[in-house]
Amino acid sequence: MEITTRLEFDAGHRIPDHKSQCRNLHGHRYAIEITLSGEIINAEHASENGMVMDFADVKRIARETIVDRWDHAFLVYKGDVAVLDFLNSLPNHKTIIFPTIPTAENMAAEAFRLLKAQYTDTFGNHLKLMKVRLYETPNSWTDAFDAT
């Protein structure tokens, strides 16, 4: 059985070497979908009985791990020194330093990496993070998943 939930956030970024407008500072209304797989929990009197995982818990973990941190932040590649210097000159600016260029693909991969350890198999139902889908626009998205 698979379950998916979706959350949205706003963030800025730039792709420093992009051949077009994405090399400029800009922002997106991102949407992130988290897909988990597992067996339906059969634990009488447990709040999660009949579920793979409570959607409220899936969302809480995603908010704490990704959404609240990235929302209304500027995601900047650690090697983008000029932009880092500029952002550091802004008092109390919310800046997230990325190990890679913050393309949609790299953002989805980083979200998957951060979330993977957060969804634990509490009920022995083989809970597993299957996929993180990140929408950069309503019509463009990328999927990150465990290749193993």
Image: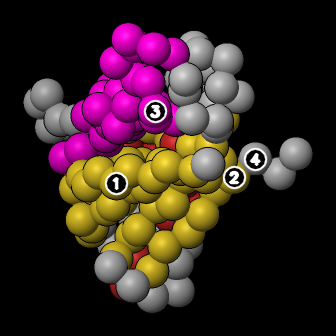
| Pick the front one: 77 or 136 | 136
Spot occupied by residue 64 in the image (x, y as percentages of width and height): 33, 26
Residue 100 included in the magenta stretch of the image? no
Amino acid on which the number 4 mark rests in the picture: Asp
Q: CA distance from mark 4 to mark 3?
A: 26 Å
Q: Is residue 143 above or below residue 64?
A: below
Residue under the point 46% across and 52% down: 4
Viewer-nearest residue: 24 or 94: 94
Foreground tag (1 vs 3):
3
* Closer to viewer: mark 1 or mark 2: 1
What residue did someone put label 4 on? 146
Label placed on residue 145: 2
In the foreground, 85 or 5: 5
Q: In this picture, which residue range is highlighted in magenta?
A: 43-72
Q: Position of residue 147 (x, y in %)?
A: 83, 51
Q: Tell me the CA gap for discs 1 and 3.
A: 21 Å
What is the distance, in whole Å, between disc 1 and disc 4 at their CAs? 19 Å
Three-letter amino acid code at the position of disc 3: Gly
